[in-house]
Image: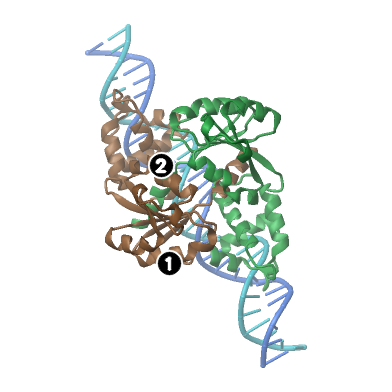
Chain colours: A brown, B green, C cyan, D blue
Amino acid sequence: MNKSQVLIKRLCAYLHYLRQLPPEVTTVSATAIAYELGYGDVQVRKDLAAVAGGGGRPKTGYPVRMLTSQLVRYLGFDRKTEAVIVGAGRLGMALYEYGGFSEYGIEIVAAFDKDPEKCDASKGVYPYGCLADFCGKENIEIGIITVPAEQAQPVCDLLTGCGVRSIWNFSAAYLRHSESVTVFNENMAASLAALLINKSE
Amino acid sequence: MNKSQVLIKRLCAYLHYLRQLPPEVTTVSATAIAYELGYGDVQVRKDLAAVAGGGGRPKTGYPVRMLTSQLVRYLGFDRKTEAVIVGAGRLGMALYEYGGFSEYGIEIVAAFDKDPEKCDASKGVYPYGCLADFCGKENIEIGIITVPAEQAQPVCDLLTGCGVRSIWNFSAAYLRHSESVTVFNENMAASLAALLINKSE
DNA sequence: TACATATCGATATGTTTTTATCGATATACC
DNA sequence: GGTATATCGATAAAAACATATCGATATGTA
């Protein structure tokens, strides 16, 4: 099954929208979702067709509870996935303390940093030297790299060696990596720039 | 001229790649860029055709300096754009102190927060009450919202009223906004989830 | 100089993604 | 019960996007 990035982003948006609806709302139409989120109604209906497979009824829409759990299952968010952060600077800690990942089945279980000053076991921040050991014991699937660019490559290598499957790279470095891991480069600046450009047209 | 998000992201990646090349490298081929960045060579060539319009030569490629400045001009990064951050928490400050935006012609000139504890004029963090005044005086085009979801809507309204044209929303709130501003919702969790899903297939 | 080759640029083809159209149907209202 | 309407689901059309192919042309080498 081929799920494209954009489709997944939309499905996540639907899911988030459904979850913040007040509990007394029991059904929701594709038209309403589309209006709230700024998509086309046909697109929403088509996206949901793959997920809910005919669960919608004319005039009322889809049952909220059922659609929610279908989305969760479809996206695989019922399976919990563990992640670690490498680099406990501002960005790393911001992500660490941000609670929003749990909504998508992801839990960040620890952070690591080379700087002993930043380490604090009571906050879940451990020395970089413990990273390999930790990942070996726990079943860590995701590594989030928030270290400076020049330190990113060895971190990537270490994570790969520990069995991490996916890497979310916030550094500006190009990471050489084996086929066995997926690396996603998050370029915040480029994201903002992209927003801006579409604006000015 | 219609530039899609994905195209802009690729062009930004090319630009970043060109900039980190050592200065002794004077020409670069589409094939090389494609290999380094993991795209197809034909795609890179096609993207660059729109930007460099025939500046490449067989066997050698494109002149790095010229291609760089053509990309900058094409993407509009020669024009400086000013941004403010509202919400000086960890994420807000991480973005504030991250230097990478200047590469794309964007400068974050101030941060604002309701909490007096977080304000510190020497660091460029001012009280929330000063926001409207500041945006009125300076020509601020971008507002970056990093406040909790329940406080995001009034911030959006205020920014809109101050003439901000684009809003980058990191909160989980759905922002009601006028036609005159473009709102881009950054859902970090969904980004990570999208990475993960494509992985498992 | 002749030749091999890396690369470009253009055109053509294929694929994915989005949008439009339309008949069918459950619900609400008279 | 009959009728109007919001909505679905399916199919078709259009648009956007990516990939493949191929001749032309600088450059380096024999």
Q: Quadrant of the N terminus of chain B?
A: top right
| Residue A126 vs residue B4, the one in the foreground | A126
Point out the tag, 2 or 1, that comes first from the N-terminus: 2
Is A44 above or below relative to A111? above
Residue type (three-letter) at the residue carrying disc 2 = Tyr
Mark 2 crowdedness (10 Å alpha carbons): few <14, some 14-19, many ≥20: some
Measured as percent of width and height from the top left, residue A43 is found at 42, 38
According to the image, label 2 marks what residue? A98
Mark 1 crowdedness (10 Å alpha carbons): few <14, some 14-19, many ≥20: some
Residue type (three-letter) at the residue carrying disc 1 = Asp
Q: Quadrant of residue A44?
A: top left
Is residue B179 visible in the rendered image? The answer is no
Chain bearing mark 2:
A
According to the image, label 1 marks what residue? A157
Element on which disc 2 rests: loop
Is residue B110 visible in the rendered image? The answer is yes
State how many labels appear: 2
